[in-house]
Amino acid sequence: MYPIDLSGKTGIIFGVANQRSIAWHIAQALDKAGARLAIVYQNERLGEMVAKLAPLLRDPLLLQCDVTQEEQVEAAFRTVKEKFGKLSVLVHSIAFARREDLGGEFLQTPLEGFRLALEVSAYSLLPLVRHAVPLMEPEGGSIVTMTFQAAERAFPGYNIMGTAKAALGHEVRQLAAELGPKSIRVNAISAGPLDTLAARGIPHFLDMKHAYTERAPLRRNITHEEVAKAALFLCSDLASGVTGAVLPVDAGYGIMGI
Ligand SMILES: NC(=O)c1ccc[n+]([C@@H]2O[C@H](COP(=O)([O-])OP(=O)(O)OC[C@H]3O[C@@H](n4cnc5c(N)ncnc54)[C@H](O)[C@@H]3O)[C@@H](O)[C@H]2O)c1
C-alpha cells in the first residue's frame, strides 16, 4: 500500500497487453491507491490475457479499443461516462512501429511506416484526450503518457520510434498549456528499458539494458514498479503543481555524458 489516496477517483488506462505491460503495473498501483479503473486492451486476443489479470484488481471495467479506430475510442469513453460519470485520470501507454522500420537505416524509413508509428504512438494521445477532457471537467484531472530518452538523443535502431516520442513530448507541452486553465495536468514519464512485448521489437534492447546497469548513477536498471510509483505520484494531488513535464524514471542514466 502506498501513502497516496485516490479513493473516489476514476481512471482509464490504455495499453495493457500482458503482466509485463507498464500500463498493467500503473493499473495495479492506482487500484491499490483506491481509484476505480477502466482497463483498455487493443484487440480480442489481448483481451483474453487481460481477462485473466483483471481479478487482481477491484472490479475493473474492461474495454477493447484500437486507438486508430475513432468509433472504438468514442465507444470506450461512452462506456466510461455511463459507468463512472466522470474521469480523473487518463494513462496513455501505447506505441507501435513495424518491425522493418526499427533497426536498419533510419534514412530509409518509408512514409507508410513513418505514418503508422506516428499515428499509433503520438497522434493517438489527441483523440483520447479529446474524449477525456469533458469527463474531467470541471474538477480537473491528470493525464500521463510514456516516453523514452530517444526523444532527445539518437539511439541507433530505435529509429522512427524516437521521432514518434519527440512528437509525443511536444504534445505533452502543447496540451499542458492548453488544458492548464481547466486544471487538467499533462505529463510524461521517460522510463528506462523494461522487458515488455513492445521492447522485444527494439534492436539493441539488451545493449541498452546493459548500458543502464553499468553507467546509470544508481548502477542498476529500473523496475516496472518504479515507473508505476512515479505515475501514481503524477496522478495524485502530490503533483498538483506539475504539468508539461517529462519525468525521467531511468536510474539517472539521462544525466550522464558518457
Ligand atoms: N518497455 C520499455 O523499455 C519502455 C521504455 C520507455 C517507454 N516505453 C513506452 O511505454 C509504453 C508502453 O509500452 P510497454 O513497454 O509497456 O509495452 P507493451 O507492449 O506492454 O505495451 C504497448 C501497448 O500498446 C498497445 N497498442 C499498440 N497499438 C495499439 C493500437 N492501435 N490501439 C490500442 N493499443 C495499441 C499494445 O496493445 C500494448 O498494450 C509505450 O509507449 C512504450 O514506448 C517503454
Image (cartoon, rainbow, N blue to C red):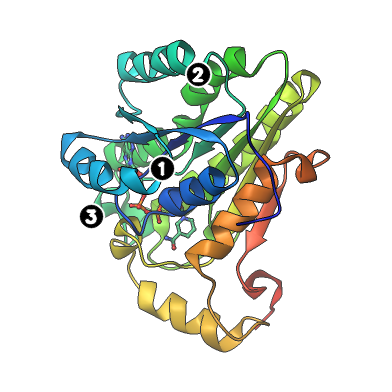
Disc 3 and disc 1 in contact, CB within 8 angstroms: no
| CA separation in Å, label 2 and label 3 | 41 Å
Q: Residues within 10 Å of mark 2 (few under 14, many from 20)?
A: some
Q: Which residue is mark 2?
A: 84
Nearer the observer, disc 2 or disc 3? 2
Residue 173 in which image quadrant = top right
Cα distance in 3D space between marks 3 and 1: 19 Å
Task: Tell me the residue that label 1 is attached to.
Answer: 94
In this rendering, the label closer to the viewer, 1 or 2: 2
Q: Amino acid at mark 2?
A: Phe
Instruction: Evaluate whether residue 29 shows in this view.
Output: yes
Mark 1 lies within 8 Å of ligand 1 (Cβ measured): yes
* Vertical position of residue 146 compared to residue 225: above or below: above
Residue 6 lies in what quarter of the image?
Answer: top right
In the image, what residue type sits under mark 1? Ile
Q: What residue sits 60% from the left and 46% below the top? A: 33
> At which x and y percent is residue 78?
41, 12
Disc 1 to disc 2, how far (Cα)?
23 Å
Q: Residue at x 41, y 44 (%)?
A: 57
Q: Which residue is at the front of the view, 148 or 12?
A: 12
Q: Label 3 belongs to which residue? A: 100
